[in-house]
Amino acid sequence: MQAQHGTPTAAGRHIAHLTIGRLRSGVAERECRGERGASMAEYALLLAFVFIAALLTISLFGDSVVALFDFATTTFQEAPNVSSS
């Protein structure tokens, strides 16, 4: 049976469905790559922020942390040796 002009056949509908499916998967793949690129940029910004925060923290509190560890080291070195007998 021949289809009338403008009426798609079953084979035509199948080909159109496959073509639309391929187009959708290609668009989804490109969008996924775009999202991956955006994620990498976000992670790079986050890493830069953490690095700057660490530098600021070390510059602000570095001397007091060193003094605290020096005090702890001295205290442990001067403590009497207690042995369990």
Image (spheres, rainbow, N blue to C red):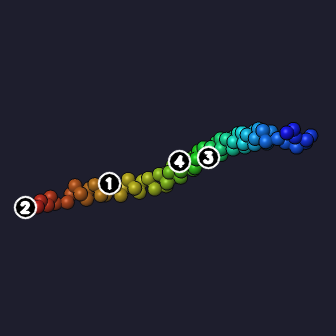
Which of pointers 1 and 4 indicates the residue nearer the eye?
Answer: 4
Which residue does the numbered mark 3 point to in the structure image?
A: 39
Residue type, label 2:
Ser
**Quick check: marks 2 and 1 in contact, CB under 8 Å?**
no
Q: Which of marks 4 and 2 is nearer the N terminus?
A: 4
Residue displayed at 28% across by 54% down: 73
**Quick check: marks 2 and 3 in contact, CB under 8 Å?**
no
Residue displayed at 36% across by 55% down: 67
Which residue does the numbered mark 4 point to in the structure image?
A: 51
Q: Which of 27 and 54 is in front in this view?
A: 27
Mark 2 and mark 3: span between their CA atoms?
60 Å
Q: How crowded is mark 1: few (under 14 residues within 10 Å), some or many (20 or more)?
A: few
Identity of the residue furthest to the front in this view: 1
Residue type, label 3:
Ser
Left or right of 62 on screen, residue 6: right
Residue 69 drawn at (x, y percent): 34, 55
Which residue does the numbered mark 1 point to in the structure image?
A: 70
Residue 23 lies in quadrant: top right
Residue 78 drawn at (x, y percent): 21, 57
Mark 1 and mark 3: span between their CA atoms?
42 Å
Q: Which of 53 and 32 is in front in this view?
A: 32
**Quick check: marks 3 and 4 in contact, CB under 8 Å?**
no
Residue 37 lies in quadrant: top right
